Structure formats: structure tokens, C-alpha cells
Amino acid sequence: MNKKPSSTVKRINALSATVFMLAASHLVSPGNATAEPLQKPASKTIFAPLLADPLEPRIAVMPSLNERSLQLDIGSSADLYQSNDREFAAGVDFGTYSRLKRSNEFKFPVDAVDYLFGINASWKKPFQNERLPFNEFSAKVRLSHISAHFEDGHYDAENNQWIRQDDWAGTIPFTYSREFVNLVLALSSPGHRVYAGYQYLYHTLPEGINPHTFQAGAEISTPGNTYIAADFKLLPIWQPSLEATRGHRGTWNLQAGKRLDNIGLEKVRMACNYYSGISRQGMYFYHPESYITAGIIIDF
């Protein structure tokens, strides 16, 4: 992997960004339809999953539009206990986040995969304030473990060795494991939501990782069962010469989507993402990247 993208890659990224904007403008084009509630269909969890967070447990198939790869996510968050007034809940999170290569004969060798599991607690409380366009406050705190691994798609069978990375000086593969506490606070109404979050790593391999990560985002319903959402994170930057992180880099995931309620698929949405920043895959935590994906997300 090159630290500086070639002119060809830059042109592809520019074209992909254009495709994304055209798709988004089509999805949110004005019409006679009115904006639907953002959390329709109603989430079974008190704290509705963040739409554009690429590490939210979910089921999704998202092919890349500017490289021969595929994102396959399998996971879910579930409330195991909810209070009678549905203002407090405790539950679990499970998720896998995979990067697959697309090859001939409908084969998808797995390049890298991350596994997440943990427990959570969430709250929500209605309120009224004439100065704010929101009527509900919610929060979710998670205690989680995540580990990452290279798989068969990252192995060079002809030379009998793992594929090396230009911007990683250590061994391949290496041990990647993190335990963290994550807190997200949100203000919402039926048509939109804004949120802010903070994550603290209390154990990590490799070592030398800055423990602080910051998050913010917004979700807006638009006409015709469509929506737009943005998730922004400040993630630590790995410095190979120091074998530690120094400073933070902004990482965006912009999503435009459409719920398929009108054809009876209430839990299914089509979505297009533009991602730019540090890779979401743990095995590439040191690597910046930019890409467009489009596919199907299933909400449970």
C-alpha cells in the first residue's frame, strides 16, 4: 500500500465521489412525499442504532465502487432487559466486520475481519424545550472487546507467505486486541438526531495507542422514506518510526439511504457510503483510505 495515492487512484476517488453525490441527490430529490420518522421501522432497542457509524453492529453487504472489494457485516445489538416505561435497558452487542476481495468465479476470499462483543446499558427521556428542535434525550454506554485478524485473502499461496504492507514495519500478521468503554449522548425528534460520543481504550495490543477517540454525527429524514446521515470520528494516527500514535485524524462516513417500506421490506434499506480517513479494519488501523460503497443494510 502506498502512502501517497497515484494520479489514477485520485481520479478514481474523484469519480467515485461524483457518483456518490449523484446518488445522494437522487435519493433526496424533492417531491410530494413528506419526510418519514427517522427511526421507522421502530427499533427494538431503546437506543436506536447509529445509521452511519461503520462499526455499529448490523447486517450489511456493501460492495466497493472504486476497488474490487466487499464489506460484509454480520451482527446485532439486543436489549435483554427493558424497564416497564422503556426508559432504561441493558443488552449485548455482537458484530463481525469483514473486508472481502472480489475474484473470478464468484469467490470472495477474506482479507481481514474484526470481531466485537460486549454489554451495554441505555437510557432515554422525553423532554420539552421551545428553543430546541428535539423532544428526546438518549444515551448508551458500552463495554466491549474487539479483535482483528488477517485471513486467507491476505496470504500469498504461491510464495507461501503473508502479504506485506508498505506502511507497517512490524510482523504480519500481528496481534490486535482492544478493550474499551464507549459513551454516546443523543438529542432526537421523529425526523432527525444529533449525537456526540467518547471512547476510552483501557487495554490495547499493539501498545502505544492513544486511548482517546471522539465522535459526532447527525441523521436527517428526507422525503420518500429517504435519509442522509454523517458520522465523524477523531482517531489516533500511528507513527511507524515511534511505534506509537501521535495526534488525531478526522474520519468521515457519509451515508445516503432509502428504506424499502413501500415494497413490504420494512427492515431493509439501500444505502450509499462515502468513507474517508483511517481504516475501520483493525489490521489496517495505521492506514488512511478513501472509498465508496453501495448495498443493502438489514435492521433488527
Image (spheres, rainbow, N blue to C red):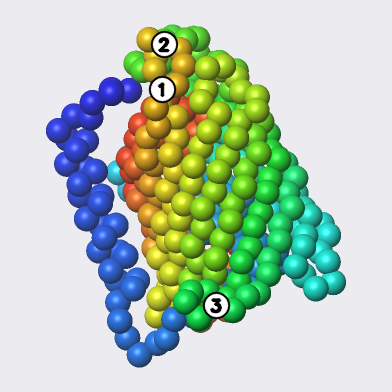
Q: Position of residue 131 (x, y in %)?
A: 47, 77
* Disc 3 residue type (three-letter): Asn
Q: Position of residue 1 (x, y in %)?
A: 33, 23
Say if 165 sits above or below 253 in the image.
Answer: above
How many angstroms separate mark 2 from mark 3 (CA)?
49 Å
* Disc 1 residue type (three-letter): Arg
How many angstroms separate mark 2 from mark 1 (CA)?
9 Å
Residue shown at 63% from the left, 75% from the top: 127
* Mark 2 in CB contact with mark 1 (< 8 angstroms): yes
Q: Quadrant of residue 98?
A: top right
Say if 93 sits above or below 206 in the image.
Answer: below
Q: Nearer the viewer, residue 150 or 275?
A: 275
* Mark 1 in CB contact with mark 3 (< 8 angstroms): no
Residue under label 1, please give it: 246
Q: Residues within 10 Å of mark 2 (few under 14, many from 20)?
A: few
Most distant residue in the bottom direction:
32
Q: Assign a secondary structure to mark 3.
A: loop
Q: Position of residue 109 (x, y in %)?
A: 50, 32
* Disc 2 residue type (three-letter): Leu
Residue under label 2, please give it: 242
How many angstroms separate mark 1 from mark 3 (CA)?
41 Å
Q: Quadrant of residue 47?
A: bottom right
* Mark 2 in CB contact with mark 3 (< 8 angstroms): no
Residue shown at 18% from the left, 29% from the top: 6
Which of discs 1 and 3 lies nearer the camera? The answer is: 3
Residue under label 3, please give it: 129
Residue shown at 63% from the left, 63% from the top: 138
Q: Residues within 10 Å of mark 3 (few under 14, many from 20)?
A: few
Is residue 202 something one can see in this rendering? yes
